[in-house]
Image (spheres, rainbow, N blue to C red):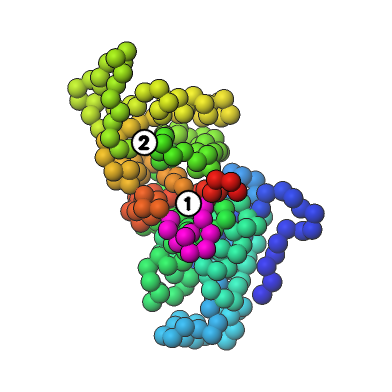
């Protein structure tokens, strides 16, 4: 099976890549990926990988087909038709692949702009551990990854993107992706911080009674200063800031119920250390009620 990479000399942004299995809920994952490709003006590549030889216990799933390429093509056909029907002008490419789904998607992530996967991410084999493929791709991909939880995705999600912000450790990559997503979607962007609330300065009154957990952090160098610093690059994005007293992962999960996308960063590491996605990002990836974008963060000095 031959991957269809950009033509030689093509230095433009890579396509949006979505990995699918043969589950009934994958139409929502493809719909999300097609919308991302359409709003970016990029091709959509749909990949289905079939392990060969088949793992133990999986043979009956594909008993009517004799070759991995035919198996993958059979799975991909309705998804490519769906994407063409919903976005008639979209360039859609089917990518059948013989091999491990996670490895295929991670390898392709170096040559695409965005990877989209479902939260189950089992590559078509329900007996594999829940979310094994999506977890590996979110942890190891070289480009941003959006993980879609089909069962919790609504037809009309709230019009808001939320990005988790730690002002003490602030990589630019998740912020830039969040601002760009909000601009592409025409949505409001919320910068969400969490943890112990800084004490107000003498020149700043304490938060009014009742504001409690959702009071804004307007301390010097805080979320408001950060928002101001980024507004010049994205002047059309409406930005709000919020600081929540509590655990960052819990705050982001709660915010996901009122958002269409939550953005978090990965550690951007390689090798064994990259397996540690980060406790906040990992928890949000498992518990958020809306799609989660995991954005690689390059280590300092790279």
Can you tell which mark lies on residue 193? 2
Q: Position of residue 296 (x, y in %)?
A: 52, 50
**Dot placed on the residue nearer the N-terminal end, 1 or 2:** 2
Residue name at image x 52 percent, y 39 percent: 172
Along the viewing direction, whichever of 54 and 20 lies nearer the viewer = 54
Residue name at image x 40 percent, y 74 percent: 128
Query: In the picture provided, is 183 more to the left or to the right than 247?
Result: right
Give yes or no for residue 272 being in the magenta stretch. yes
Within-10-Å neighbours for mark 1: few <14, some 14–19, many 20+: many
Secondary structure beneath dot 2 equals strand
Give yes or no for residue 28 being in the magenta stretch. no
Residue name at image x 59 percent, y 59 percent: 109
Residue furthest to the top in view is 203
CA distance for labels 1 and 2: 18 Å
Can you tell which mark lies on residue 267? 1
Within-10-Å neighbours for mark 2: few <14, some 14–19, many 20+: many
Q: Which stretch is magenta?
A: 268-277
Q: Position of residue 97 (x, y in %)?
A: 60, 73
Can you tell which mark lies on residue 244? none
Secondary structure beneath dot 1 equals loop
Q: Position of residue 295 (x, y in %)?
A: 50, 49
Q: Is residue 252 above or below residue 64?
A: above
């Amino acid at each position: 099976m031959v991957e269809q990479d950009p033509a030689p000399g093509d230095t433009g942004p890579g396509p949006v890549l979505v990995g699918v299995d043969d589950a009934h809920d994958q139409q929502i994952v493809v719909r999300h990926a097609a919308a991302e490709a359409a709003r970016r003006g990029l091709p959509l590549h749909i990949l289905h990988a079939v392990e060969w030889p088949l793992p133990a216990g999986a043979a009956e799933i594909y008993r009517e087909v004799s070759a991995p390429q035919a198996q993958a093509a059979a799975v991909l056909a309705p998804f490519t038709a769906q994407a063409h029907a919903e976005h008639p002008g979209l360039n859609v490419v089917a990518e059948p692949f013989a091999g491990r789904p996670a490895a295929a998607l991670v390898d392709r992530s170096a040559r695409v702009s965005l990877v989209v996967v479902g939260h189950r991410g089992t590559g078509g084999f329900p007996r594999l551990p829940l979310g094994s493929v999506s977890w590996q791709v979110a942890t190891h991909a070289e480009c941003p990854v959006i993980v879609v939880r089909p069962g919790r995705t609504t037809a009309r999600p709230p019009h808001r993107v939320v990005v988790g912000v730690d002002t003490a450790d602030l990589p630019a990559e998740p912020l830039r992706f969040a601002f760009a997503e909000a601009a592409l979607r025409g949505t409001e962007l919320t910068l969400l911080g969490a943890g112990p609330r800084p004490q107000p300065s003498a020149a700043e009154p304490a938060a009014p009674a009742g504001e409690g957990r959702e009071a804004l952090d307007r301390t010097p160098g805080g979320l408001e200063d950060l928002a101001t610093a980024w507004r010049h690059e994205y002047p059309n994005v409406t930005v709000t800031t919020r600081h929540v007293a509590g655990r960052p992962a819990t705050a982001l999960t709660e915010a996901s119920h009122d958002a269409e996308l939550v953005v978090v960063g990965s550690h951007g590491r390689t090798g064994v250390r990259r397996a540690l996605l980060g406790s906040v990002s990992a928890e949000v990836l498992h518990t958020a009620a809306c799609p989660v974008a995991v954005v690689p963060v390059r280590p300092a000095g790279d």
